[in-house]
Amino acid sequence: MDLDKILSIGGKPGLYKMVTQTRSGFVAEALLDGKKISVGLQSNVSILSEIAIYTLEEEVPLREVFLKIQGKEKGQKTSVTHKDDKIKLEEYFFEILPDYDEDRVYASDIKKVIQWYNILLEKGMTDFSEKKVEKEENQEKASEKKTVAKKPKTEKTIAKKSTVSKTSGKKVAIKNQAAKKT
């Protein structure tokens, strides 16, 4: 399972998998208990593949943070839980990401990252590497943008139209004269 389909919904605990779209939002299935819920467009929803952690130099995608946790823990659950105290969580996160920005990454964010990692691990979603297909597509799109030449603008003429409309029971002829774009 790719992180593109895994969601965090504001006000709801845990993680969700997007099942299908509806007219008014989408249906999501909880990873913890498998219950399906309807999520409206007004809900605050974050896709895990779009989340990044602030560091002093750049933003590190959540995928890379999960890979670092996985490397440190050798594919097992984290040595700290999301319920541990703030100091212990920050010490652990410094081991994972030594240059994370303490001013913009709060203890609540660290708790979420650790909880999300453990949930994904329980569900067997341990492939956090970026898909090669996505990288190749992004490279192809970038090269296409560079090689596409701009088409010359052609002069369009608008034909003269004559329409009849009813206003207060009387027929009034409206003539629109065409203007040439230059």
Image: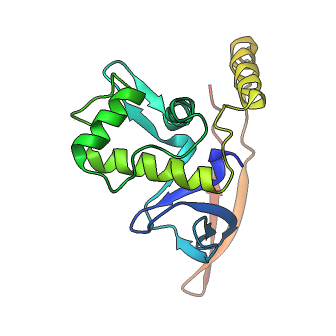
Q: Percent from the top left, x then y, of residue 88?
A: 27, 42
Would you say residue 122 is visible in this rendering? yes
Q: Percent from the top left, x then y, of residue 111?
A: 36, 50
> Is 8 placed left or right of 25 in the picture?
left
Towards the viewer: 125 or 178: 125
Question: Vertically, is 182 above or below 159?
Answer: above
Would you say residue 153 is visible in this rendering? no
Q: Residue at x 29, y 34 (%)?
A: 91
Q: Quadrant of residue 6?
A: bottom right
Q: Residue at x 33, y 57 (%)?
A: 83
Q: Residue at x 76, y 27 (%)?
A: 132
Question: Vertically, is 167 above or below 65?
Answer: below
Towards the viewer: 133 or 117: 117
Q: Quadrant of residue 42?
A: bottom left
Question: Vertically, is 82 above or below 38?
Answer: above
> Is 175 placed left or right of 79 in the picture?
right
Q: Residue at x 28, y 37 (%)?
A: 90
